[in-house]
Image (cartoon, coloured by chain):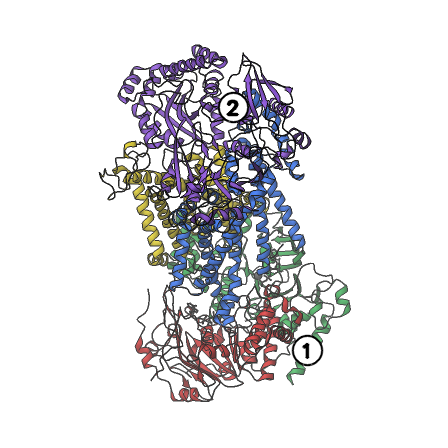
Chain colours: A red, B yellow, C purple, D blue, E green
Amino acid sequence: MENQTAPVSAQDEFVKTREWQELMESDALLKVTDLQVHFQTERALIKALNGVDLLIRKGESLGLVGETGAGKTTTALSILNLLRRDIADTKDGSSIVFDGKSVFDMSEKELRTLRGGKVSMVFQNPLTALNPVFTVGEQIGMVLRVHQKMNDKDALKRAGELLEMVGIAGSRIKDYPSQFSGGMRQRVGIAAALACNPQLLIADEPTTALDVTIQAQILELMRGLQTKYDTSLLMITHNLGIISELCQQLAVMYAGRIIEYGSAKDVLASPRHPYTQGLLGALPSLEGPRHRLTAIPGVIADASNLPDGCAFHPRCAQCCEECKTRQPSMMHVGNGHFVACFNHGKE
Amino acid sequence: MDKKLVFRRLRRNPFFLTGFICAVVIVLAVVFVPMLLHWDPIRQSLADRFMAPQGFSEGFKGHILGTDQLGRDVLMRLLIGGRSSLIIALIAVVLQNVIGVVLGIVTGYFGGAVDSVVMRICDVFLAIPAMLVAIAVIAVIGASIFNLILVMTLTMWVYLCKVIRNDVRIYKNKEFVSASRVFGGSDFHIMFKQIFPNITTNLLIIGSQSFGTVLLMEAALGFLNLGIQPPAPSWGNMINVGRGYLTTYPWLAIAPGIALMLTILAFNFLGDGLRDVFDPKRQSFFSKKKNRRKPWKIRQPL
Amino acid sequence: SGPAAGAAQGTAPAGGESAHSKTFNIVTSDSLVQLDPHNITTPADEYVMKMSYDSLLDTDHKGKFVGNLATSWEFNTDATELTFHLRQGVKFLNGEPWNADVAVYNFQRLISHKDDFAVAINYFSPLVGAEKIDDYTAKMIFDNPYPFALNYLHQFVMIPMEANKEMGDQMFTDMKQIGTGPWIFDEWVSGQYAHFKKNPDYWDKDEYNSYFDDGYIHFVSEPSSAAGAQISGDADAYISFGGINSDVVPLYKGTEDKIQVVMNDMNMYADLRMGFPEGSPLNDEKVREAIDLAIDRQSIADQIFQGGGVPLSILVPGDVGYDSTMAPYEYNPDKAKELLAQSSYQGQELTFLGSSAFLKSQDSMEAITSMLQDVGFKINLNVEDLATFNNEMAMGKWDLMYATNQCINGDPFLYFNSRFVTDFMHSNFKNDELIGLVKKFNVEPDAAVREDLAKQISKWNKDFHGPALALANVKGIYAVTKGTTGINLYPDGYESLTHISWDPSLAK
Amino acid sequence: MVRYIVRRLLQTLIVLFFVSVCAFLLVRIAPGNPARLMLPQTATDEQVAMMETKLGLDKPLPVQYWVYITGIFKGDFGTSTSYHQPVLPIILQRLPVTAKIAFGTVFFGCLIAILLGVIAGANRGKPVDFFAVFFALIGQSLATPWLAVLLVYIFGIKLKILPAIGTGSGLKYFILPVLTGVVTVAAGITRIARSGMASTLSEDYITATYAKGIRRSVVNWKYAFKNAMIPVVTTAGINLGSFLAGAVIVETVFGMAGIGFLLCDAVNTRDYAMVQSLLLVSAFFITFINLIVDLINARIDPRMSLE
Amino acid sequence: MSNSIDYTGREPLVEARHLKKYFKLPRKGVLHAVDDLSFNVYPGETLGLVGESGCGKSTVGNVMMRLLPKTDGQLLYRGKDVFTEWPDKLEISKKMQIIFQDPYSSLNPRKTVDKILSEPYFIHKYGGGDAIAKAVRELCDRVELPHNILSRFPHELDGGMRQVVGIARALSLDSDLIICDEPVSSLDVSVQARIINLLMDLQKRLNLSYLFISHDLSVVRHISNRIAIMYLGQIVEMADTDEIFTNAMHPYSIALLSAVPRVNTGSKVARIVLKGDVPSPVNPKPGCRFAPRCWMSRPACAAENQELVETAPGHFVFCRFAAEARERAKAAQTYSLD
Ligand SMILES: Nc1ncnc2c1ncn2[C@@H]1O[C@H](COP(=O)(O)OP(=O)(O)OP(=O)(O)O)[C@@H](O)[C@H]1O
Ligand SMILES: Nc1ncnc2c1ncn2[C@@H]1O[C@H](COP(=O)(O)OP(=O)(O)OP(=O)(O)O)[C@@H](O)[C@H]1O
Ligand SMILES: [Mg+2]
Ligand SMILES: [Mg+2]
């Protein structure tokens, strides 16, 4: 059952193209290279991340899309070095460098200043990301107390201001999360994430659980903040619409790997990877004529049982022999647009 | 739940394994060993009083665990006492389960008046500790195996009923129940064919744990002279008698005490193991493989 | 002064360096249940009351009487009137004087409770009137000759008249015990302890002036706990009605230098009683004899009663009518089997009733059951708590019963009368010959004749192999910490703590 | 809040009413006659009948119940037939002993259990966790009478460092009884605290707390602690309730005159008023403590609405 | 591909008339989950029901399936009242079926797919084991479900598979109306497309009618012939799909449509961001329920009750200022496009 004898060869073979290498060596706030994370569960070894390369420049917003289980949340948690040590195994060779310093080399203390201070995160599920037994004031205030050494009173006061900023009455700091709706809770999470003016804000599907009108409010809010404080943003989502409205760069993830990267406009307008193409084709659109949706065939990639070669090949219409044995590297297709596909460009 | 996974977890859970093996050994011993021994558990022989366990006494007459204050073989009494304890526990647990499950399912499923009535009854039962009820009731109806079973059933179905009811209240709002309903499934069909299979693991766990509770309660009642009546042995009344001879003939109290402890331990281990195995949300000691490497202490690539 | 202080002081000097604490601590397995001095129901009720009250006369429980609040007394010739000459100059704690009015008041109170006070029902049912003769002379009047009255007077203490009239019986439940005794009842915490202070104005100070200033009687039902308390130095004595449980004796091993475990021979013994419900197999003499022969009394006496010995009959040494020439009970299981085979016994199940409340009853009953089964009886052993036991007994549906027996002051009157005449146990046993003997005995004022009658009765019973079979004598065990004096366990099971004191010369 | 409490108290009254009915019937079904027990064995049947009349036992059951229940509202819980005294003062006199055992047991039990459970839950798979699990399983398998007897033997008789008798009110008298209870209580609560802690620590909001840069010890002892305490409070309440209602075994072994012991006695002597009142008092304590527990939990966890 | 259907002269398959469902909340009041809902579903068409979370979409479905007792109103199936005129609950279950939102909780975790799919036949006493087994296999074929999954447990399937099982079960009794309660909202995009295609194929093949409940406007647009937009238990606008998307008139519909983020580089829509959250449906005040959040609310909105007005054939709007709203929205669009 356990698939521990993974094809080591595939890893070794994997060579980065020069352009990608250059891109990865360029100046950036956050650089993730070769991030590999495996989860050991009872059932199987889950290869959640298989060499993720990612970079975010200062003030830039990067969208990260991918189907469920692709490893988006795992990537985000890795950046804060928050994966549970007892179940998550970060492989040797993985590196995450924030502002010139590797998060894996940081001491506990440095990590604590990183977390919530320089990098903060909005969690995927607003219903579970707030502790139900503490007031929202306390939960926003704790960041301030830790990072800005505020006393209780000031922290609470500031928490109130932050709440106002995200559109909730400041007097509600004494309320408990259960007294808020999902959208408000997500805004509380955002308020806490913004408390210390982070250099990088990681937003893990901040609107998935929300209604359209509320989602619009939150997107509005984030856009405003980004222009105001010049915060870098890692926006994780399923929703290409959000990316198109909010992000400059876009990275598409499949089975624990980045398979396409480029400016959001480029990628959405002319997707190169068959998965990205499939994704766009599978989305019903809000305008124009209605075509039959082109569903991506096959099943969602199973991280515990990844195929050799390109992980997408069993579902790919353009699959060739090479795809079944070798991992494609990120190839430049022009204009800072990269794609990990041997048949890139062939339409 | 994945059967293979369950078996693997069972195999890997030392608590469960220990409990299971011990429980099997105890049950087998209690059932079969008395057939091999020729002692009469009730027949006393005053001349052979207080013989120490084998190895300690001179003139060993085959009393492996020695004899008691009336010259009866302690091992034999232990095993026979164990028989009645286990029978009481077994029947009481089964009855508790039947009552608890039926009432729990019915109240949880229908809610409303039935629910309020049964829950108020539960409240009344819960308002007096089981032990006190047992003392009062046994004093009233007298101690016999049948009455003990009755009392244990009477006092403990409540807990099960509440658990099952809460379980059912969760399940009845699941969409698969609605699905049965939109096909016109009868209440009986839904309660016992759709919902019931989902609570069986819980039953198994609670059942094996209440086994221990029943044994403890039986011992406590025996200790208060409200258990199985002498001269028939029970672990409770053996401890009760034995404590009078603690300084002089300590095995009289220690032997039943240890037997009781091992048995309950076995069933507690078993129950705990089952819970670990079936309840993935519960954080068991053995359910997760450890990974000692700290992610941030990683060799840098050369 | 809380119990904590007392208990703490009790432990402090256990090493023996400093003087012994002025507070005594006694543990007992008996329990005090109520505080009306006339309604004594338990042994503890009696000796607790006697700490703070005085009776008219006292006894050594072997047939000798000494004056207390009465200085002398006499019966009239047909023993229907008992006249007391009262002690002068005694006052109750509230200053009320002790005199004949008070005595008569007490007698009257007993009479008015003749259907609900245990003392009245048990011992003074013949009492019908009282009379004051002069200020210090009073008289009890019985409805028929009652020569045994003296034997039970020690259980009847004198309460003050004015106080009782004024406060009513509330005074007892409010714990206002106004007596004349050497101790002042101070506090009772039910199930835990009773606290006493020394009475500084005790009328008999010259005779008895305790070393202790105050003290506690702790009620601890659990024998090993009680013994543990004494062993750890918290208590000066451990005592219980009929003696403490012999099982705890081994606990005292190694404490011989500090604690003395006293083992008295008692005239208390365990006996087996027979019931005769309709169609009872026990009506067959052979069956009764088989039972008699089947029981290995010596084993029971040695193994269960710590060598208490086997009585010769239902009367034991110290009892009126004890006959030392009587042949001992025989143990012969083979003969028992034979007799049983010849008898009309058809293998009916005999119900063997007993109460777990009696000393050693569980073990004894199991042993007897086993012995009877060995010769071929079918026994249904039925050990009940006291309440159920009383109930089952009253329904008369039993064949054998286990009980203990003792003759208060060695006088078998109560025993004979209640057993063979009034049959309170509902044994349905009626034998005119025996009843005739007992009735004669009951009214016989001449001691020598009575002695002879008692002998006849016990012989009759023994020859009949029932309805009572003596089993084994109880060993009267109690433990006193060396130096403690004035603690007594009498042969009839009663204990006395009234004159507790401390003698340092005995401590080392 | 106030409304909630009032409503709960009313519910309590209903429960108590049913308890009183059950207790009333129970003692009366029991074989044995208090009138007979009050009198010496030698009493005649007429005397017993007279006593029954005096006690009101000859009246029909509903009348007896009515007398009993109306008495309660006047503060009269009846008169004990074995103590010849009103019941309530006796119970109140015995209560402190039981209360000391109960509070001592639950307090120390919780203290140990929470420390052990939280540390174990936060260090899953480590030796301390194994120890906690093992302790919990063993502790829950020990029969109280046996443990008590063993403790008496070891500390009271062999080592002689603690008094084996329990009637003093000094602290040392309570050590062994409390210790006996603590083992069981601590075992149960350790288990609950541990699994509560462990499951809390795997919640998203705890990861979110770490993501805010909060120190591990603060997360454990402040943020996760509060969540993990909810089931602990409930269990501690149940334990406190049942101990307050009578730690029968402990009281029996240590000869402590608490209300559990009193109940055993009262049942044996068919002291109707006493048994009824004791069961009622027990039920009162338990329902009252349940209310307190619910209030505390509602304070800890605002999701538990009081409605 | 156009979604338009010509309704003229057609009999509705199902007709909801003034359907109401109130929940009595202890001590809090009455929750108006569904308040006076009227709509028709015609044979072979899909009526999309959209609205924000908690607006009562599922409640409509549950009431129609008689999973909840209605408070008031009628539901006619081919002219006969489902609540009063259909004596047998087995009978009605053959007419209408439902696909649930959550493929995880809608399949009994303790039963194999085989057992799950045979349950309807079992309840309806379809015949012996063989007959049922055969029927189950046919069912699988109909939804292109491989037979080898029949012996599996739900947890061994992925979300898409499970939902297909759910669909198969809904089809088992050959019902002609299927209520789809957000059947794709918990699925990944790639799977979602497959399910939508399957539903549409089945509709074509079997001439099914769908009441398609969703909060995802693009999905609803894709699949529905007509759309009803709900707000707090009421339908605020109902029209043909294209009509709604090109010519929405209710202020809420306009805001809703504008709020959806679009994968689009060309035309931008002026976003109307509504303030505040969806208010609670407990004890709603009289007057327009949307008024507190409305971007053009007038004092009159709060005061008077309104009615669903047919502004164009088949286009119903629940707002007296609809025309004005439409104008302002149009103006805004041009403005932002500059
Ligand atoms: N704690 C964990 N234990 C075991 N496996 C895990 C754990 N967390 C994540 N995984 C696995 O790692 C893979 C990647 O998960 P991750 O949560 O990062 O995906 P995701 O892209 O965020 O998906 P989604 O869109 O559903 O949030 C999945 O296969 C998941 O099952
Ligand atoms: N059984 C119930 N008791 C009380 N209120 C209920 C019940 N079921 C639903 N509600 C309430 O009715 C309202 C409508 O609920 P419903 O589930 O129909 O909304 P929905 O539109 O389906 O939302 P979602 O998109 O979240 O599924 C909600 O406010 C909900 O809280
Ligand atoms: Mg995720
Ligand atoms: Mg819904």
Residue type at tag 2: Tyr
Q: Which mark is residue E330?
A: 1
What is the chain identity of the residue bearing mark 2?
C
Which one is closest to the eye, mark 2 or mark 1? Answer: 2
- For this orientation, the residue located farthest to the left is B59
Quadrant in which the N terminus of chain D appears: bottom right
Under tag 2, what secondary structure? helix
Q: How crowded is the residue under tag 1: few (<14 C-alpha within 10 Å), some, or many (20+)?
A: some
Q: How crowded is the residue under tag 2: few (<14 C-alpha within 10 Å), some, or many (20+)?
A: some
Nearer to us in this view, B149 or C262: C262
Q: Is the residue A299 above or below the residue A120 in the image?
A: above
Q: Quadrant of ligand 1?
A: bottom left
What is the chain identity of the residue bearing mark 1?
E
- Image quadrant where residue B246 sits: top left
Q: Is the residue E244 above or below the residue B125 in the image?
A: below
Q: Is residue B118 visible?
A: no
Quadrant in which the C terminus of chain D appears: bottom right
- How far from the left and from the top, in percent, is residue D263? 52, 39
Residue type at tag 1: Lys
Q: Is residue A251 visible?
A: yes
